[in-house]
Structures are given as structure tokens and as C-alpha cells.
Amino acid sequence: MEGFTDEPGVDLVKPEGIRFPYRSILNETIRNTFFHVALWMAMFSLYLVGLYHAILYLRTSRKDHDLWSEAYNKAGILFGIMGIATGSLWARYTWGSWWTNDIKLNMATIAMFIYFGYVILRSSFTDEEKKARVSAVFSIFAFVALIPLVFVIPRLTDSLHPGNGGNPALGGEDLDHTLRLFFYPSIIALFLIGCWLAQLKFRLLKLSDRVLKNR
Amino acid sequence: MPNKGDFWEVNCYNNSLMYSHHTKQKSLACLALLFFHVLLQAQSPENDFLRSTGKIYSVVAGIVIVFAGLAIYLWRLDRKLTKLEKHINDEHETS
């Protein structure tokens, strides 16, 4: 795998100021780090908050925590779908195919399906309390499954993804500093957008819960 | 290499086909096939629109996907909220 060079391709513009690193087949799409990769990081953070509320629900049995957990998990699912879609498009123009048998793609898809199962599970209950308790437990299970699927298994083999294969803790040079400058704020921004979506969802769920109870 | 105009023009034609009349359906379907063929051909060589200028437009398309995802989510939330509002208003009227 070639490293980063400052050598731009023939058709790349080279403006003054901040310059992005050039890497063989990535070209300008190295900027997808701020969107595609940051989406997955934000998704993971949203699922983490969903897990937190699921545990709190099991400890306190307060209905609010169940609704928060649902709202955050659903925002995470949206981010996951967008991550798959942006990744697929990028793969078409980088690897030449909408879908490859890359280990990371397949494992991420399995993780996605587990969370789809969460939504289906929720909609299959009529008893409110049973629904809340079972989906809280399922939420914990889904998150525990997410960690090996996304963070462990892809690292055991080689992946087509840039900067992948092997232990990333030892790959400090994998991400250029000019990219970090935008990558980290992008994660925070997308996470905050996700929190806002989840909060809107929570308010809607809570309101509809109250309205239906008064009927 | 096809230029920018070709790419968007083909898209325009395809969009207009969706609203076509029933009587002209057959011939238009043939035309659509032809345009799809052109569109696919435009995508096969190395230098199509999304691959031009260092593939920057594939990043733009990615941003469009993110925006569309957020917009669809919010739009669906809006619809659910409208339904709830209607429900509340109906309750008020009956009581």
C-alpha cells in the first residue's frame, strides 16, 4: 500500500493554504472521511447513548428511558443506512463495484440487520411494559454484537478500506493531520445532529404516548 | 469523454418520461431504453462526470445522500406530528 505524498495527480487543483494528502486511487474522495467515516463514528455514539438508556430503563423502569433508548437507536439506524449508502456510492467509484465482499461491509450489514430486528421487535408487542423490557434487553444484546462485528472481526483479516488491516492503535500515521482537523469536528457535528433527531423523536413518542393514554 | 451537458440532459429526459401519456407509452419506453443505454454508456468509461476532477463529485453525491437521509427522516417525523395534531384536534371537537 502506498503512503501519502504531496504529489497531486494531473487533474487535481493545488490551492494555497490547507492541502489534502494525495493517495493513489482515492484522489479527491479522501474527503469522504469527513462524511462516510464520521457517519459510522456518530452512529456508534448514538447506539452507545441508546444502550445507556436501555440499562437505565432496566434499573429504574421509567418509561422515559425506554422512549429515549428507542429514539437514539432509531437515529443510529438512520445514520447506519446513510453510512451504507455513501459507502456504496464511494465503492462504485473507487473499487469499481457497488458492493464488494469486503469483510467490513458484510459485518456492518449484519450489525445493521440486528438493529432492524430491534425495530421489528418493538412493533410486535401489544403489552407496553413487556415491549419496553424486552427491547431494552435486545438493545444491550445488539450493542454487544456490534462491537465484535465492526471493531474486531474486520481487523483480523485484510480489508479494502484505506488504512485498514492490522491494529489501528499502531497505525498512527494512517490519517494525515490535515484530515484530522476536519474529521473530528465532523464526528461531533454529526453526533449532535443525531442527538437533535433523537430528541425530536423522543418528544413525538412521549406526546403520542400521553395522547393515546388519555383516550 | 461526454461533457457535463450530456449527463444532465439525459436525466431531464428520463424525468419527463415519467409523466408521459398512456397512448405514447410504447414509443416512449423505447426512447427511455435508448436514453438509459446512453446513460449507462456514459458511466462505463473511466472519465465520466462523477469521475472528473479527481472524483470530487462522488464526494458531493455522498453529501447529497446525507442531506437526503436527514430530510426524509425529518419529513416523516413531520407527517407523524401532523397526524398527532389532527388526532388531538378531533378529540377536542368531539368532547
Image (cartoon, coloured by chain):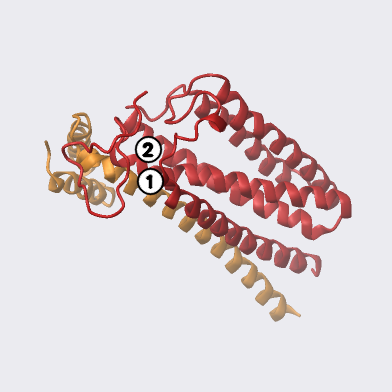
- Where A90 sits versus A72, above or below? above
Instruction: Check if mark 2 and mark 1 are on a common chain.
Output: no
Q: Give, as a three-letter code, the residue at label 1.
A: Gly
Label 2 SS: helix
Q: Quadrant of residue B30?
A: top left
In the rendered image, which residue does mark 1 sit on?
B62
Q: Residue A150: percent from the left, percent from the top?
A: 59, 32
Quadrant where the C terminus of chain A is found in the figure:
bottom right
Query: Which chain does orange denote in the image?
Result: B
Most extreme residue toward the right, as rendered? Answer: A60
Quadrant where the N terminus of chain A is found in the figure:
top left
Query: Which chain does red denote in the image?
Result: A
At horizontal 66% and vertical 70% (from top left) the residue drawn is B87
Q: Which mark is residue A89?
A: 2
Chain letter of mark 2 equals A
State yes or no: discs 2 and 1 in contact (Cβ < 8 Å). Answer: yes
Q: Give, as a three-letter code, the residue at label 2.
A: Leu
Asked if residue B26 can be seen in this view, the reply is no
Q: Quadrant of residue A135?
A: top right
Front residue of A2 and A102: A2
